[in-house]
Amino acid sequence: MNNLKRIGILTGGGDCPGLNAVIRSIAKPAMMQYDSTVIGIEDGFEGFVEGRMRELTPKEISGIVHLGGTILGTSNKGNPFQFPVVTPQGIEVFDYSGNAIRNYKDWKLDVLFAIGGDGTMHIVNKFTDLGYNFIGIPKTIDNDLSSTDMTFGYDTAVSIATEAIDRLHTTASAHHRVMVVEVMGRYAGWIALSSGVAGGADVILIPEIPFQWEKVCEHVLKRSKHGQRSSIVCVAEGARPAEGGLVVKEQDKKRTDPIRLGGIGELVGRRISESVGLETRVAVLGHVQRGGTPTSFDRILATKYGTKALELAAEGKFGFMVSLRGQDVGSVPVKEAILKLRTVPPDSQLIASAKAIGTCFGD
Ligand code: F6P
């Protein structure tokens, strides 16, 4: 019996490279093997609540493996269970999950594939508990989902950040400056740690290791006294001093996570220039890390994730998230995957290696 006559796909949360590769690797085999009608839900859960969708054609899902962004559009503002609505009293949140469920039924979906980060997986879990057929596919440049060794999008973000650090080295050395580079990653330091090590940063600051200002400044000063007249400081947006909090750029009640981080790089740059007296510049990489073509690693991972997700659906294994363990893609219950965020373990081998070669973490 064909239980995949009508399938839905949505991309939720911030975009990242590889989303289109996943859409393609679910939709293509679904059309070819199961003759499925594939409903593309527009703009993530916002479109799910508001009933916006289109039937995907074979043409639309072809030739997109290398494209960044998402052909479906996405949003990080439409949690159906806490849907933000602008009222005369300001922004209020309402439970609009009933609207989403009505659409799920009207569209006669056999399963809905939700490609997203931890916010998306929490929503997938809630719909699963209500008895609907959902399967999660883990994406995020932050790499902060537990129960999977890696999310797709992360490898691309690390490559982009590494290339940026490579470029900053030459301008830093030409001007004998300290260059501070702020990278994304939310509450996890994966991007900063990996790109910092790969790019040869002299200081790496991550949320998992609250830093001491004196240690950071001393390190840069010592380098300068030893004739190393330029330094690179790679700062995760979620890094914070031991005595101090997160630097928040904006609070937006419409977002699934209302906190938008940003600004720690500027703070670190100012402090170094004031304390050490060296000329300092700050580069904030921002959304450049999420744009453009995915690396071949992310395209391959995304392709494995998509085809495995379809396989799970064919087996009726709903409420699961596909997950990478070593080289192989398997699955875990979404309930397990959302238990905690996956942050960098302070005793990680990469931190030890970085420290062994003299990298300062400010601790
Ligand atoms: O979760 C991905 C991410 O890029 C984070 O690294 C960052 O903190 C956040 O999204 C930025 O969100 P927005 O695109 O809404 O500014």
Image: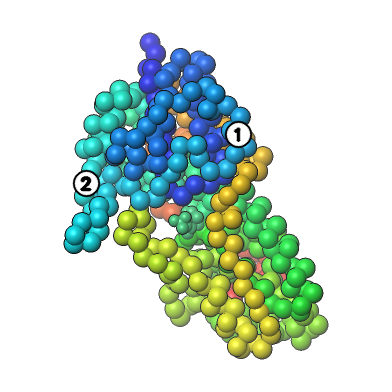
Which mark sits nearer the N-terminus, 2 or 1? Answer: 1
Colour scheme of the picture: rainbow
As rendered, which of 57 and 356 lies closer to the eye? 57
Whether residue 363 can be seen here: no
Within 10 angstroms of label 1, few (less than 14), some, or many (20 or more) residues? many
Q: Is residue 281 left or right of residue 340?
A: right
Q: Residue 237 placed where, x, y %?
A: 52, 66
Does mark 1 have its CB less than 8 Å from ligand 1?
Answer: no
Residue 196 placed where, x, y %? 65, 63
Q: Residue 356: x and y, percent?
A: 71, 68
Q: Residues within 10 Å of mark 2 (few under 14, many from 20)?
A: few
Task: Answer above or below: position of 56 versus 86.
Answer: above
Residue drawn where x is 64% and y is 76% of the image: 281
Quarter in which the N terminus is drawn: top left
Residue 297's label in the rendered image is: none
Left or right of 222 on screen, residue 10: left
Residue type at the position of mark 2: Asp
* The quarter of the displayed image where residue 3 is located: top left
View extreme (front): residue: 88
Amino acid at the residue labelled 1: Val
- Given residues 191 and 343, the one toward you in this image is 191
Secondary element under disc 1, as helix, strand or loop, is loop
Q: Residue beneath label 2, please?
A: 95
- Image height of 253 relative to 153, above or below: below
The CA span between labels 2 and 1 is 35 Å
Q: Name the residue at 49% across, 67% down.
A: 262
Q: Quadrant of the C terminus?
A: bottom right
Q: Which residue is mark 1?
A: 65
Q: Quadrant of residue 359?
A: bottom right
Q: Residue at x 76, y 77 (%)?
A: 175
Report whether residue 107 is seen: yes
Along the viewing direction, whichever of 322 and 36 lies nearer the viewer: 36
